[in-house]
Amino acid sequence: KPLVFSGVQPTGNLHLGNYLGAIRKFVALQENYECIYCVVDLHSITAQLVHDDLPGQTRAITAAFLAAGIDPAKHIVFNQSRVPQHAELAWIFNCVARIGWMNRMTQFKDKAGKDRENASLGLLAYPSLMAADILVYRATHVPVGDDQKQHLELTRDIATKFNNDFSERIAELDVGVEMMMGEERVNGFFPLTEPLIEGPATRVMSLRDGTRKMSKSDPSDLSRINLTDDADAIAKKIRKAKTDPAPLPVDPDGLASRPEAENLVGIYAALADQSRADVIRDFGGRQFSEFKPALAELAVEKMAPIAAEMRRIMADPGYVDGVLRDGGERAGALAEETMTSVRDIIGLLQR
Ligand code: TYM
């Protein structure tokens, strides 16, 4: 049965990249799938242990989910640490995954920097916790931005190795499902999760440098549009966005070697629910001095109501906490079902 899972870290401000690459898709998928959306607080202590206001950040991401249009009554919204089965399965996956797999993760290499010996062990094991987030629900589909692609490949590697290593136990206990592994039909316990990475904004770039990803950790606030920016801030950041001097190309192929132009066109397309080709049809040949105000107006139109709704929701932390508590209970029941089988498969006594 198809099931969607995704997570967002409560670290720093949510930005347009998080919204277009992930949260907007979370909202759209609710229509046709059962969905579980998680604020991954345990992930946010991997790169930085001490935070100023982790509870406030966790509530803010939750408020952003709700403000964007996620329905916590029909679907599940909760914070990761509330369901300890995530950490329990992550430990087991630490024993399934190989150190070499973790060492190859580009996000680990980026975040650990030069002094890798000094990175936390949690940062190295990050993808194993992420695989546990997804597989503790045996989720089949995961909407994310392009930067998470490698982590989802690793999630499939972990599922595959677990299914292979325990194939006899899975068959004996009759807890598997039929699935295709390449050409082969096998009986596996964990599904091979599909990433959902589509559309014109799977990788939104910095407004100051079209070759770098828009990111929560960029020191320049002008590099990103925050979900909480007001109309003036949004307009100013788009006006100041780096561009090259040429007008927009008349053919979408002309965007290929122009990262800043490509990024702004991609953002416009995603906000307007169009393709890049649609945007070029309307704006091809025009100067950025014409395109940028149109983009700013569209961004304000789409983002400002979300920011306002987010502020309204955050004014009532009791409501937000209630959503997380209720979501956590429902998620916990599903996760425990999986873990009961996992303990049987491995040979851990039930508790
Ligand atoms: P995080 O918190 O860094 O980002 C949340 C989501 O936003 C996407 N994203 C972007 N999309 C387009 N352009 C960008 N510039 C951009 N920046 C971020 C991310 O791809 C992500 O979808 N490891 C995850 C959190 C996580 C998770 C999971 C996700 C933990 N467990 C299980 C899916 C399933 C992360 O750090 O996302």
Image: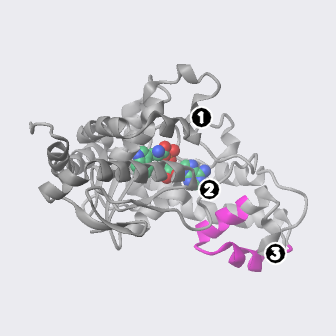
| Percent position of residue 65, x then y | 40, 54
Residue displayed at 54% across by 19% down: 118
Mark 1 in CB contact with mark 2 (< 8 angstroms): no
Secondary structure mostly seen in magenta is helix
Q: Nearer the viewer, residue 350 or 210?
A: 350
Q: Nearer the viewer, residue 192 or 249?
A: 192
Look at the picture and state if 115 lies above or below 295: above
Mark 3 in CB contact with mark 2 (< 8 angstroms): no
Q: Amino acid at mark 3?
A: Gly
Horizontal side, residue 285 vs residue 83: left or right: right
First reached walking from the N terminus: tag 1 or tag 2: 1
Residue holding disc 2: 203
Look at the picture and state if 180 lies above or below 154: below
- Determine if the magenta segment contains residue 265: yes
Q: Nearer the viewer, mark 1 or mark 2?
A: 1
Horizontal side, residue 218 vs residue 345: left or right: right
Q: Amino acid at mark 2?
A: Arg
Bounds of the magenta segment? 263-285
Provide the secondary structure element on which disc 2 rests. loop
Q: Residues within 10 Å of mark 2 (few under 14, many from 20)?
A: many
Look at the picture and state if 180 lies above or below 139: below
Direction top: furthest residue: 118
Q: Marks 3 and 1, how far apart in space?
A: 39 Å
- Determine if the magenta segment contains residue 314: no
Residue at disc 2, CB closer than 8 Å to ligand 1: yes
Do we see residue 39 in this rendering? yes
Horizontal side, residue 91 vs residue 130: left or right: left
Residue holding disc 1: 109
Residue holding disc 3: 284
Horizontal side, residue 210 vs residue 163: left or right: right
Residue displayed at 57% across by 55% down: 146
Do we see residue 15 in this rendering? no
